Amino acid sequence: MAEVSKGIWRDTPDLGFLNEILAMPGGEAVAACIQCGTCSGTCPTAREMDFTPREIMALVRAGYRDRALSSNMIWMCASCYACYVKCPKEIKLTDFFYKLKQLAMREGYANPASKRAQVLARKFAGNIRWLGRSNEMWLLLKYFLSTNLFDALKYTGMGLSLLRTGRLELWPKKSKSASDVGKIVDRCREGAAMRP
Amino acid sequence: MTKYSYYPGCSLDATGKPYRTSVAATAPALGVELREIEDWNCCGATAYMSYDHVEAFSVASRNLALAEKTSENGDVQIAAPCSACFAVLNNAVHYMAEDPKLMERVNDALGAAGYRYAGRAKVRHLLDVYVNDVPEDLLTSKIVKDLGMVRLAPYYGCQIVRPKNDFDNYDQPTKFDGYLKLLGAQVAYYPVKTKCCAGTFITTQPEIAARMIGLLLKAAKDHGADAIVTCCPLCQFNLDNFQKEAGDYYNEEFNIPVLYFTQVVGLALGIPPGELDVDKHRVSADAMLAKII
């Protein structure tokens, strides 16, 4: 699996990757991109990205699989939909980047920015399957156990303030919905496993 | 009186409790009847979408199916006070309407737990309901406090207007501004009103989040706002709890209270701040409260 930093990729243009993207629902959008850069211009986190959203679109179109999927861009997307509503070709960019996230996560692409976001996504999904609802305290606990427990110390002051004002749910309360949610998630996964 | 299926969302039971309290305190006075969806589950939020979108929409749609059960036919109006819940549920409704295949897969998943979504849900943000469904004269007739000395920054955030909403412009909305004026307050010029609050970055990318939050606080401070008013528990959480970190980034000090719009409505209606949980936020709103007469 590719764990690369900018400048040392070994991938070559692979039209198979482009075709794979084009075949995904919503993936055909890349063909419409005119490389105007409006997405990068509206993006509030573009300055922290190794490739900007426009560059990612160009990389996908040229078939650079490793570069696109190991980029921190997709994980630096805060899902604010600023680019989505401004795209002159009406490409649903935020959704497209979600697809790339799912693909990168499934295929094990990693970089320092993605690791924490992927852990949070996995723990979040796991939490809901477990409780039916999200419990912020337990989500963060599991997140910090899987990333860096010392980071959690920075939140002590905030945690105490939340506790004092009764805004922290200490014990995970299983909602009645949990068993339904479990059945729904299981059926989704069976369905996904059966599709080619 | 219009009835709504009420979907509070997970945050309103934890960090966003003051939002729940202030909704419960103000909705009946304005004739908004909220019936909480029984046994609702998490909407999936943005984190679930990174994981798998069919799964995320299926989990979200269980709530739509539950809301549909409350009426035999016609549209079912769901009111969601959290912008993230609103965006996820609203996306689910619109994307399934556009893509029958997605709807089929979601219904297949829902079937495992005995549910079915027929496509009758209409998702509304609670701010939309307060602004557009409550008659103006009813609201103004109930206002007993004068907010004329208070200057408020209307912070919409991203998910209430984007990607899709039926009530205001996606980039420079104005309805919230007008609503605060109607309540009698001064409205601060706030050009960053739909910029992102950093969302989950507060956990995964705290340094970047400090910059993004700082931008929103600085604009409010520079334009003389006594408080920022939000319509989302995630925005409120980020803006209220990380003012020190944001201040360190911009090398200045922030001390701006961040209130829910329902709390401001309650204050205008003369409900004591304690009953609206105004004292439960991190940054004290006392200086602002002193200006209300």
Image (cartoon, rainbow, N blue to C red):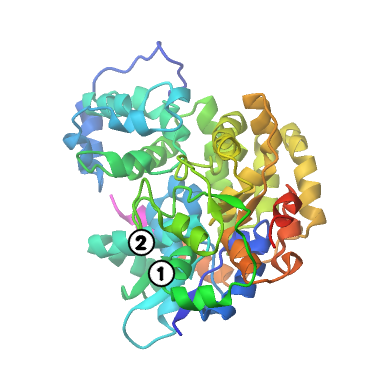
Q: CA distance from mark 1 to mark 2?
A: 8 Å
- Mark 2: give few (<14), some (14-19) or many (20+) Cα within 10 Å: some
Is the residue A17 above or below the residue B50 in the image?
above
The secondary structure that dominates the magenta segment is helix
Task: Tell me where residue B97 sits by quadrant.
Answer: bottom left
Which amino acid lies under the numbered mark 2 shown in the image of this protein? Phe
- Mark 1: give few (<14), some (14-19) or many (20+) Cα within 10 Å: few
Tell me which numbered mark, 1 or 2, is placed earlier along the sequence: 1
Image location of residue B135, percent across then percent down: 44, 76
Q: Secondary structure at mark 1?
A: helix
Q: Is residue B198 left or right of residue B98?
A: right
Magenta span has B32?
Answer: no
Of all residues, the one furthest to the bottom in this rendering is B72
Instruction: Name the residue that disc number 1 marks.
Output: B132
Magenta span has A194?
Answer: yes
Label 2 lies in what chain? B
Is the residue B116 above or below the residue B89 in the image?
below
The magenta region covers A187-196
Q: Are marks 1 and 2 in contact (CB under 8 Å)?
A: yes
Identified at 65% across, 65% down, the residue is B267
Which amino acid lies under the numbered mark 1 shown in the image of this protein? Asn
Image location of residue B103, percent across then percent down: 30, 65
Closer to the camera, A167 or A151? A167
Identified at 17% across, 36% down, the residue is A32
Residue A169 in view in this figure: no
Q: Which mark is residue B29?
A: none
Label 1 lies in what chain? B
Instruction: Name the residue that disc number 2 marks.
Output: B167
Q: Nearer the viewer, mark 1 or mark 2?
A: 1
Q: Is residue B258 left or right of residue A31?
A: right
Identified at 37% across, 46% down, the residue is B172
Closer to the camera, A20 or B202? B202
